[in-house]
Every structure is written in C-alpha cells, then in structure tokens.
Image (cartoon, rainbow, N blue to C red):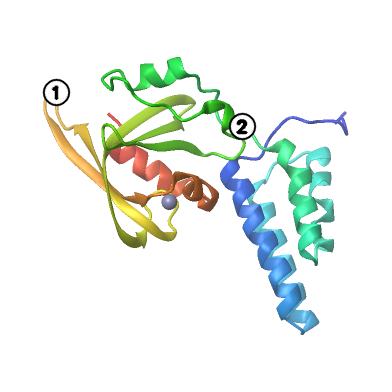
Amino acid sequence: MTSLLNKEPFIRCDQYNFINFQVKNMVHAHSTVKDPNVLKAVKFGAVDKIAALFPELDDSQKAIFDTITSIEEEVQGKNFLARLKPYVIPFKTITEKNVAKLFPKAKKLKVPSLADIDFQEIVYLGWYDIRSEKKYLIFNFDGRLLGIHGTFRHTTKGVCAICNCHEEVGLFMANVKSGKETYTNRGNYICNDSQKCNQNIRSLEKLNHFVELLKN
Ligand SMILES: [Zn+2]
C-alpha cells in the first residue's frame, strides 16, 4: 500500500527548475493571453511536459502535482513551487575536507561558505578563486563527487556549455589527461555567475556532456 505521507525526495534540482520555468510560462500566459483555448493549450502543454519528466510516480507522488492545473496567478505558482521544494533531492553533502580531497594540488584554496548554500538549489557547486585565478567546479557525477578546475577568463555574452542559456560567460580551460602521461587543455564557455547558472539548468544533458569532456 502506498503511504500518503511518502516524503522521500524524488525531484532533481534541474527538474525543479524545469517545473519552475513551466509554471512561470503558465502564469505569464494567464496574464497576457485572452483566448481560453490558447490558455488551455499552454496549461496542458506544461502539465504534459512536467508529467513526461516523471513516468513512474506512485499515487502519493502524483498527488503532489494535483493543484498544478489551477495555477493562474503568480502567488499560486509560488505556493505550488514551495510545496514541491521538500521533494527536491539535495546535492551530496560537501565538507571542506571533501573539497581539499577533490583538489589536492590547490594550496590555500578558499572554499565558499558551505553553511550558506542551499544544497537543494544546486546542480553543481562552482566558484572563482581570486588568488589562483581559477574556477573550481564540483559535480555529482555517477553518484560520486567530481572536481574539475581550470583557468577562467570573462569574455562576453554567449551560450553557456552547462546551462545552455545566453548569459555573461567566460572561457573555462582545464588541463585534461589525453594519454597515459600526456595532458591537453580543453574547455568551453560557461557562466561567470555559477549561482545564476544553477538556476538556469533545466536539463542535465549539456552538463553531462561538459563533464564527460573535462573529467580526468
Ligand atoms: Zn550557465
């Protein structure tokens, strides 16, 4: 029997961002579109896209999404998302020890204040270290923490290789193993602002590709 009190998190952060995006679309359509048939199409289009993310939900999990079709105003959208938030799977716990282990060669690396991070709101952890002029990225890849660091130069507006959005980006270059004892520089353009980047991620497709390219 399925319990109605099943509180197990089952929504990934990128999926939560995707739902947020669809809800915003619905609210925006409600305030700008007059034709009820068009509005209906927008609403059920959004619901279908969200349902497609979760093909195997049990009844108690489905019930969490029940009120989505009644969302019209911004406040309803916000309330809906707030009710969903407890079901978001948090990022793997990171300690300063983990960080030091992930980047053994980085001496005196300044780690962002981990206590201030909402781990339900990150798909990856990224920060720029002024002293070494490098960007440090931590991913949860195949169930384990994976650190990638590289040089980072801010350039201009462009499409980010992690979130796939048009943002202020810079060229991130990592030194990657290319053979048994040989290394090569590989990289791509990614957001300057890793927090903004995280909020933009609505699918893991680009991120996984980025990690595959740059992991050692
Ligand atoms: Zn980005």
Quarter of the figure with the N terminus: top right
Q: Secondary structure at mark 1?
A: loop
- Circle 1 sits on which residue? 180
Mark 1 and mark 2 residues within 8 Å of each other at the beta carbon: no
Q: Is mark 2 within 8 Å of ligand 1?
A: no
Crowding near pointer 1: few (<14 within 10 Å), some, many (20+)?
few
Q: Classify residue 146 as left or right of residue 91.
A: left
Q: Position of residue 31 (x, y in %)?
A: 74, 76
Is residue 111 found left or right of 70 in the rendered image? left
Quarter of the rendering containing residue 74: bottom right
**Residue in view at x 25 percent, y 45 percent:** 187
Q: Residue furthest front?
A: 131
Amino acid type for the residue under numbered disc 1: Lys
At label 2, counting other C-alpha atoms closer than 10 Å, the crowd grade (few under 14, some 14-19, many 20 or more) is some
Q: Do we see residue 82 in this rendering? A: yes
- Mark 1 or mark 2, which has the lower sequence index? 2
Q: Position of residue 162 (x, y in %)?
A: 41, 48
Could you tell me which quadrant the C terminus lies in? Answer: top left
Q: CA distance from mark 1 to mark 2?
A: 36 Å
Mark 2 element type: loop
Q: Is residue 163 above or below residue 13?
A: below
Q: Which residue is at 78% across, 40% downward?
A: 61
Instruction: Name which residue type carries label 2.
Output: Pro
Disc 1 versus disc 2: nearer the observer: 2
Dot label at residue 90? 2
> In the picture shown, does residue 30 fall above or below 179?
below
Where is residue 144 drawn, in percent x and y? 46, 24
Q: Position of residue 190 (x, y in %)?
A: 35, 50
